[in-house]
Image: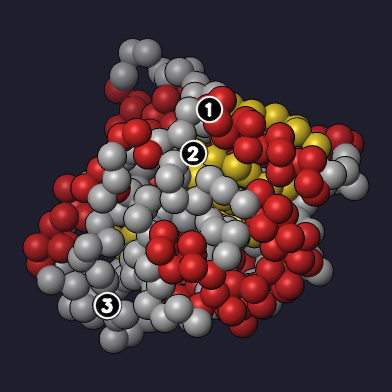
Amino acid sequence: MNLPDAMNIPPDQFDRFKKQGYHIVGAHSAVKPCLWSGRAVKKEGNCYKSRFYGIDSHRCIQMTPSLGCNQACLYCWRPIEHPVEAPRHWDAPEEIVEGCINAQRRFMSGYGGLENIDTLLWQQSLEPRHAAISLAGEPTLYPHLDGLIDEFHNRGLTTFVVTNGTRPEVIEIIRPTQLYMSLDAPDKDTYVDICSPCNPAMWEQILRSLAILHDHPSRTAIRITLVKELNIKDIKGYARLIEIAAPDVIEVKAYMHLGYSRRRLERDAMPRHEEISRFAALLAGELDYELTDEVELSRVVLLSDPSFHTILLNNSRQSLS
């Protein structure tokens, strides 16, 4: 694989992404096979998003339109110690989508020769139906994110966008199937300590994004990643912020001791599932949300707004299958 000329990325960093299994698409995007896609075609389980939202793990593309990020979160498993600069040229959405779909097909085609796969699931995996825009970096840094989402939808795929909330002007215009926003601190000081933003004033941008989520036409989700000794505190503070957004669902998830985060945090910074469940239950009580589901293997609990009732959730799951 040759280093794209348009990308401001040193060769050693390019090699680092390649060794981690990333396939660089064009000048600045990337796609990586999710371990759950491989497990799904072998009937060895599915991602928790399959259980929560009906996503077919074997038909899901894990991608990003921007390898760069404006935060350096301590819990991130990516190599944030090696920041990626913005490219000199931004690729068009059509190029990115085509490149990602083709890369996903190449990844999944490799399972065709295995004996322990489900042939039907493998054949389906060659026609992806969902894009998780959450692989690495901050997707809202890509200036044509709205067009990228539209292009995926035009090709019959649903989309999840995971954002850190620091670019409210982008959040306001995008229309993914589900819009995730990370909220990893109940206050500004904790946010600065755990997320190391390039500008502390980004906290005010996050507050703006929470307000935008309140009336956003996409299905909305707040994701809280909990790290022991850092942000498992002030449940009332989290609740006050979440009330601003009034999301359809909340995911409370444990930090996982993986990747480059192992260089920054000790293994015991990873909460047990029981701790996640306890925190989620207390948060649900503060917000009058319902404990909807949980997956112990992934140490994640799903809360939902009472108005986001069972029939609506079931319909949403069916639409994403």
Q: Position of residue 110 (x, y in %)?
A: 30, 32
The C terminus sits in image quarter: top right
- Looking at the image, tell me whether mark 2 or mark 1 is earlier in sequence order: 2
Amino acid type indicated by mark 1:
His
Q: Is residue 152 visible?
A: no
The N terminus sits in image quarter: bottom left
- Looking at the image, tell me whether mark 1 or mark 3 is earlier in sequence order: 3
- The answer to whether marks 2 and 1 mark residues whose Cβ atoms lie closer than 8 Å is yes
Name the side, left or right, on which 5 lies relative to 228.
Answer: left
Snapshot colouring: secondary structure
Q: Which residue carries the number 3 mark?
A: 85
Q: Which residue carries the number 2 mark?
A: 254
Total number of numbered discs in the rendering? 3
Amino acid type indicated by mark 3:
Glu
Q: Which residue carries the number 1 mark?
A: 273
- The answer to whether marks 3 and 2 mark residues whose Cβ atoms lie closer than 8 Å is no
